[in-house]
Image (cartoon, rainbow, N blue to C red):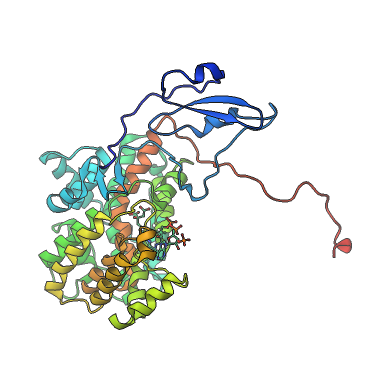
């Protein structure tokens, strides 16, 4: 049975309860006995969690700092209370503001889904029209950005160019620093969502040595992106409707995913009250990593390295020996099939029908077949994630592998902004500054160089 999202309860102050009362009727508290002192502590449980700060009262010596929780990579730490996205990893559920991803993928569009993530409700017809108008009229970038792009080598990775030019946008819009001004935040939101495809399209064209293609405001969000990538000598680019819809659904599936590495980067960097362009550049950098959004590119490289269906068993052997990772498999939260992977697989077949089957598909299907049967993967609950099949689609659509993480960053921008704004407006949030457990040298005196070994 899927866990239903928890009702929000007010947080109770922590108290120190004498032993006798601790055995009374069940309460939403945790009783902790410190066996070093015999003292007991009653810690409130709120929303299925305890406040780490409530542990600080647990001390042996009153002069101590107090107890901390230690959780490298935040395996079991909630950094925020969020209303944006809900994932049940055991069952494979993903909902944006309560709407199941399957329904949004089938019935919505990316811009409508972005509106939902940012404003918490689906837009009415007027709101949607207004929203699309503003995004569409913020697709142009300052001409100076072209000079930055010209400075990159022809073979510069488009993610490096994207990270740099997003950060550069902060220098063109100093008003973005006014982060507690709602109108300013909305304007930066239009700009970021509107300009990401343009920055990506220009980066792609730079890598080909082709002239930049400017936005065409008569096209849809995905259609205009395809225009800025693939238009050549024709006066008007007409996107293929199948590819345009496939890209729009892929954008919906990639729009947000609660507190993933790049959303955490957006929140953490944003918590210093920097402008949203700088925070988005940081989030894009986090997404670039091969363990995160860069995995879709790594999956293709892996399938090409395997080379044939016959060589899959040998590769899986190397994975089980710990020599390689089956890229596109596994997830920190999903311990079941990633619901997005299932939907993406369906899109793959639609694109292959039009563009021809990707020859690497058979290798991918064989990897999945073996992995879903093999105890190494079953025991570790390793299933295909969002990145396993996307690369096959992107390659068939004509994208080079280096553009795959860019295709992840563009739609994720709306999720990052939704997470950033929720953090900014959360009265409990302030600058992110984790503690540490110090395991280094104790105090020692400076040694003059002539006395060093
Ligand atoms: C995304 O967080 C999100 O929501 C991210 C994302 C989003 O929408 O924002 O969903 C997008 O980033 C998807 C993930 C894309 N990354 C990959 O496909 C890279 C390959 N997968 C992994 O490296 C790994 O599965 C992670 C990074 C996704 C999750 O890593 P965890 O949770 O830290 O798990 P782990 O590395 O500790 O692995 C646990 C065990 C280990 O084995 P043991 O040490 O127990 O023997 O599982 C093994 C790992 O070796 N394992 C894998 C594996 N992933 C984990 N073994 C082989 N192949 C893999 N892919």
Q: In this view, does 326 lie above or below 66?
A: below
Residue 27 in sight: yes
Split into 4 quadrants, where in the image is the C terminus?
bottom right
Q: How many labels does the image show?
A: 0
The x and y percentages for residue 53 are 53, 31
Q: Quadrant of residue 389?
A: bottom left
Query: Residue 2 placed where, x, y %?
Result: 26, 42
9 is higher (above) or lower (below) than 230: above
In-front residue for pair 355/160: 355
- Is residue 179 shown to the viewer in this render? no
Q: Residue furthest right?
A: 451
Give how far across and how far down residue 27 sits, in percent: 41, 22
Looking at the picture, does residue 76 appear above or below residue 307?
Answer: above
**Which quadrant of the render holds ligand 1?**
bottom left
The quadrant of the image that shows the N terminus is: top left
User: In this rendering, would 238 be left or right of 288?
Assistant: left
Quadrant position of residue 396 = bottom left
The residue depicted at 25 percent of the width and 44 percent of the height is: 96
> Looking at this view, is 365 or 8 the one in front?
365
Residue that appears at 33% across and 63% down: 406
Residue at (25, 69) in percent of width and height: 394
Q: Position of residue 14 (x, y in %)?
A: 51, 23
- Horizontally, residue 74 falls left or right of residue 8, namely right
């Amino acid at each position: 049975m899927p866990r239903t999202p928890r009702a929000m309860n007010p947080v109770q102050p922590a108290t120190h309860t004498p032993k006798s009362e601790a055995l009374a009727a069940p309460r939403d508290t945790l009783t902790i006995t410190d066996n070093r002192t015999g003292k007991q502590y009653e810690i409130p449980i709120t929303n299925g969690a305890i406040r780490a700060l409530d542990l600080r009262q647990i001390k042996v010596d009153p002069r101590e700092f107090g107890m901390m929780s230690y959780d490298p990579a935040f395996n079991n730490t909630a950094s925020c209370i969020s209303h944006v996205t809900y994932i049940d990893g055991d069952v494979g559920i993903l909902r944006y503001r309560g709407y199941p991803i399957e329904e949004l993928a089938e019935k919505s569009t990316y811009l409508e889904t972005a509106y939902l993530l940012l404003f918490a409700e689906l837009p009415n017809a007027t709101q949607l029209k207004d929203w699309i108008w503003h995004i569409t009229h913020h697709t142009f970038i300052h001409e100076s950005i072209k000079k930055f792009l010209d400075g990159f080598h022809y073979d510069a990775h488009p993610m490096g160019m994207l990270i740099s030019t997003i950060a550069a946008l902060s220098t063109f819009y100093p008003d973005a620093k006014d982060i507690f001004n709602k109108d300013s935040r909305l304007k930066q939101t239009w700009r970021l969502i509107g300009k990401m495809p343009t920055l990506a399209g220009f980066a792609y064209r730079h890598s080909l040595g082709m002239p930049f293609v400017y936005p065409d405001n008569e096209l849809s969000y995905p259609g205009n992106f395809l225009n800025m990538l693939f238009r050549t000598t024709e006066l008007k680019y007409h996107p293929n409707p199948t590819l345009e819809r496939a890209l729009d659904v892929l954008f919906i599936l990639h729009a947000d995913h609660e507190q993933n590495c790049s959303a955490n980067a957006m929140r953490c960097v944003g918590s210093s009250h920097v402008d949203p362009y700088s925070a988005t550049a940081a989030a894009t950098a986090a997404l670039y990593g091969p363990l995160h959004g860069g995995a879709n590119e790594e999956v293709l490289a892996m399938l090409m390295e395997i080379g044939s269906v016959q060589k899959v068993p040998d590769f899986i052997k190397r994975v089980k020996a710990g020599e390689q990772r089956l890229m596109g498999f596994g997830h920190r939260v999903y311990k079941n099939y990633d619901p997005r992977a299932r939907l993406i697989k369906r899109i793959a077949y639609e694109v292959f029908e039009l563009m021809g089957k990707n020859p690497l598909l058979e290798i991918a299907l064989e990897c999945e077949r073996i992995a879903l049967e093999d105890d190494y993967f079953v025991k570790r609950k390793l299933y295909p994630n969002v990145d396993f099949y996307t690369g096959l689609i992107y390659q068939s659509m004509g994208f080079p592998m280096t553009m795959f993480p860019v295709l992840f960053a563009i739609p994720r921008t709306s999720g990052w902004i939704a997470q950033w704004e929720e953090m900014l407006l959360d009265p409990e949030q302030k600058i992110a500054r984790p503690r540490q457990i110090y395991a280094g040298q104790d105090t020692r005196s400076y040694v003059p160089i002539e006395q060093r070994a």
